[in-house]
Amino acid sequence: MVPSMDVSEWNRYEIFSEIKVPYNIPFFVRCDGRNFHRLTEEMEFKKPYDKEFAEIMVKAAKCLFKGGFNPMLAYIFSDEVNILFLEAPFNGRIEKIDSIVASFLGSAFSLELHFRKKVNKIISFDARIIPIPKEKILKYLAWRQLECWRNHINSYAFYTLIEKGLNREKAAKMLKGLKSIELHELVFKEKGLNLAKTPTWQRRGVLLYFEEYFKESTNKITGEKVLAVRRKLVENWDLPIFNSPEGEKFLYKIIKIKN
Ligand SMILES: Nc1nc2c(ncn2[C@@H]2O[C@H](COP(=O)(O)OP(=O)(O)OP(=O)(O)O)[C@@H](O)[C@H]2O)c(=O)[nH]1
Ligand SMILES: [Mg+2]
């Protein structure tokens, strides 16, 4: 018979369980939907953008704010969600944060998809953690928003060529190496669509964050009227460009972190 091991010995095999995010450093958890290309095809979501798909993503991300993790904000575009934490949940344990955030998001997405489309799909997200010094939070968001913008012009150009009858390979080949201005021109020439005028959420993504407001109430003992600060979760589908003075001001107000 193999000699049994006690708990402390088994614990020694769990070599990743104590890996933690750096102490007192903010971090993003970036989640990305697995095989969403296939999923969106099967579900016949409109290409390149489907408002209902985006609504499901946002609804799923919103659930994270009710999961007891206390995120600061979430930035969403395509099948990607970036969740900012100023304080680490689960004592900063990476395995725990990654797995729980990703599974929470997957479950929330599956339920919302079921609710809207009456389908039973098992959805999953991957997750990675990106520790960020406080002064780089804005830059990180600006970087992801730039990715959203690139995604926007590339996918419009790609589906413009597909609509013209090109197959996926030919379309991808034709677009390879084209500059952003050339992609704009292609879509304008072929479709008459100005990519600077598409709905803002397609170009700049969606942000979930808390907004403070004052609520008047009465002090039960003195009868005095008092103003209490409350906060509510808002979803913003009409964002500024983060890498602009207006965008920086907007984000500073939310994050309350100065450079
Ligand atoms: N039809 C449609 N598809 C979308 C929309 N938003 C995102 N997608 C799809 O989601 C995909 C996201 O890209 P990726 O994450 O690179 O593709 P993926 O299939 O999820 O691949 P992995 O993340 O590597 O598993 C896009 O390629 C689109 O096919 C949308 O609004 N409409
Ligand atoms: Mg994906």
Image (cartoon, rainbow, N blue to C red):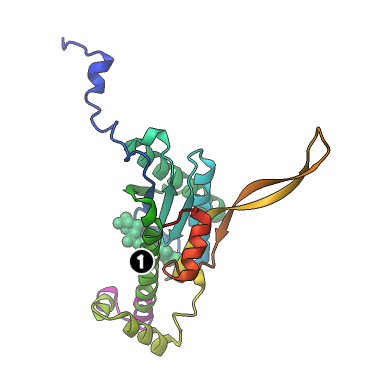
User: Looking at the rendering, in which quadrant would you find the C terminus?
Assistant: bottom left
Q: Secondary structure at mark 1?
A: helix
Q: Which residues are magenta?
A: 158-170
Counting from the top left corner in percent of width and height, residue 115 is at 56, 51
Q: What type of secondary structure mainly makes up the magenta span?
A: helix
Ligand 2 quadrant assignment: bottom left
- Going by the numbered disc 1, the residue's amino acid type is Glu
Is 255 in front, or is 115? 255
Residue 46 in view here: no
The residue wearing badge 1 is 147
Counting from the top left corner in percent of width and height, residue 98 is at 36, 42
Counting from the top left corner in percent of width and height, residue 202 is at 46, 69
Picture residue at 26% right of the left edge, 17% below the top = 8
Q: Is mark 1 within 8 Å of ligand 1?
A: no
Magenta includes 86? no
Residues packed near mark 1 inside 10 Å, few (<14), some (14 to 19) or many (20 plus): some
Residue 24 in view here: yes
Q: Is residue 137 above or below residue 189?
A: above
Picture residue at 43% right of the left edge, 50% below the top = 83
Judged from this view, the residue extending furthest toward the bottom is 189
100 left or right of 6? right
221 left or right of 179? right
Is 221 in front, or is 157? 221
Q: Is residue 151 above or below residue 182?
A: above
Counting from the top left corner in percent of width and height, residue 72 is at 48, 48
Picture residue at 66% right of the left edge, 52% below the top = 213
Magenta includes 163? yes
Q: Is residue 96 above or below residue 175?
A: above
